[in-house]
């Protein structure tokens, strides 16, 4: 399978193609291995340099990378005994929200996350990770189930936003999101969230309120996409790069603003370059912070959550 390169990675693509060509020829000429090793070292150095100085727009591109790990990938790599739960008990099941019970190192947890899917058929099935109201109502059902059995909730955020179509509005999209915000504000269980790719608008926030929030290094979290912001402010999506910089949507920006608690490092080359390493970093963070939250009683957690929410924007 050909490796996918983003626009700013074109210098890497040239080196990669040279390596691929030499590897084919080296089967008959082993003396070329030294040249391959030299190019591989050059590739790694170039990659490290590129990823150490990404612009806000380039981070948006990395967050949207087609090979970036999704919620379903993290479930397989981080958790055990996952039992997916379906349906909102009201209208239907929305595959763009995946959720269910699992264990994290023998600790029962409820997982809820956006799922974009891979390949044309699955992307269509998952609606490209843009939930309908029934998706958020399914998430609400699982949250209340977790509260009933005192199970911590772990959410994975990766969506460009809630589905903007008329059928979503007909079925109460805004009400479904608002209800989730109200429930997560005072639900009596522990909440942890991780932004793994895009965190777009209320579609992300609907499962994003938490007692401890983390973002992968190259993920983004914002009230709207840079393209939408540019269209509103400058009346042109051509200004998307400028909008991305102005919106302060990167993990470091949000950490500086105290809107998130932790930045989880990604492998050099982004999360898509090594799913296992990325999943291990998330697992380490979740375990550490879940154990810290378990040391607190629920009344203290709720008070801290209230202070956290009311301090936003100060």
Image (cartoon, rainbow, N blue to C red):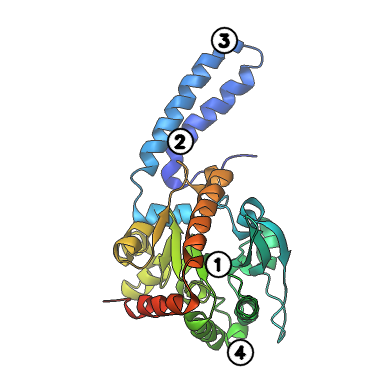
Does residue 7 show up?
yes
Q: Residues within 10 Å of mark 2 (few under 14, many from 20)?
A: some
The one of 276 and 128 positioned closer to us in this rendering: 276
- Mark 3–mark 1 distance (CA, rounded to whole Å): 51 Å
Place of residue 266 in the rendered image (x, y in percent of width and height, measured from the top left): 46, 47
Residue identifier under label 1 = 155
Count of numbered marks: 4
For this orientation, the residue located farthest to the left is: 314
Residue identifier under label 4 = 170
Left or right of 226 in this view: 40: right
Left or right of 203 in this view: 225: left
- Disc on the earlier residue, 2 or 4: 2
Residue identifier under label 2 = 12
Kind of element beneath mark 3: helix
Residue at 60%, 55% in the rendered image: 74
The one of 143 and 150 positioned closer to us in this rendering: 150
Residue at 56%, 50% in the rendered image: 279
Kind of element beneath mark 1: strand
Kind of element beneath mark 2: helix
- Disc on the earlier residue, 3 or 1: 3
- Disc on the earlier residue, 2 or 3: 2
Question: Which numbered marker is on residue 222?
Answer: none
- Disc on the earlier residue, 1 or 2: 2
Residue identifier under label 3 = 31
């Amino acid at each position: 399978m050909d490796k996918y390169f983003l626009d700013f990675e074109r210098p890497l693509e040239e080196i990669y193609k040279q390596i691929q060509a030499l590897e084919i020829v080296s089967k008959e000429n082993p003396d070329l291995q030294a040249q391959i090793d030299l190019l591989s070292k050059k590739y790694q150095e170039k990659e490290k340099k590129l990823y150490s100085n990404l612009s806000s727009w380039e981070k948006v591109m990395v967050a949207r990378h087609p090979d970036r790990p999704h919620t379903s990938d993290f479930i397989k790599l981080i958790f055990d005994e996952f039992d997916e739960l379906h349906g909102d008990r009201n209208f239907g099941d929305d595959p763009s929200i995946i959720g269910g019970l699992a264990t994290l190192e023998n600790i029962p947890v409820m997982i809820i996350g956006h799922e974009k899917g891979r390949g044309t058929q699955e992307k269509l099935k998952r609606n490209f990770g843009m939930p309908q109201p029934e998706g958020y109502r399914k998430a609400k059902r699982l949250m209340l189930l977790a509260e009933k059995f005192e199970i911590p909730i772990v959410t994975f955020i990766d969506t460009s936003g809630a589905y903007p179509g008329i059928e979503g509005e007909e079925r109460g999209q805004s009400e479904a999101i608002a209800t989730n915000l109200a429930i997560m504000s005072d639900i009596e269980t522990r909440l942890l969230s991780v932004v793994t790719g895009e965190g777009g608008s209320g579609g992300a926030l609907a499962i994003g309120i938490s007692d401890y929030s983390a973002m992968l290094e190259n993920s983004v979290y914002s009230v709207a996409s840079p393209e939408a912001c540019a269209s509103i402010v400058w009346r042109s999506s051509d200004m998307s790069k400028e909008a991305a910089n102005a919106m302060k949507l990167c993990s470091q920006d949000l950490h500086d603003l105290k809107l998130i608690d932790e930045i989880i490092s990604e492998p050099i080359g982004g999360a898509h370059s090594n799913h296992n390493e990325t999943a291990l970093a998330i697992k380490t963070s979740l375990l550490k912070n879940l154990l810290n939250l378990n040391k607190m009683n629920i009344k203290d957690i709720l008070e801290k959550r209230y202070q956290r929410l009311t301090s936003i924007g100060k």
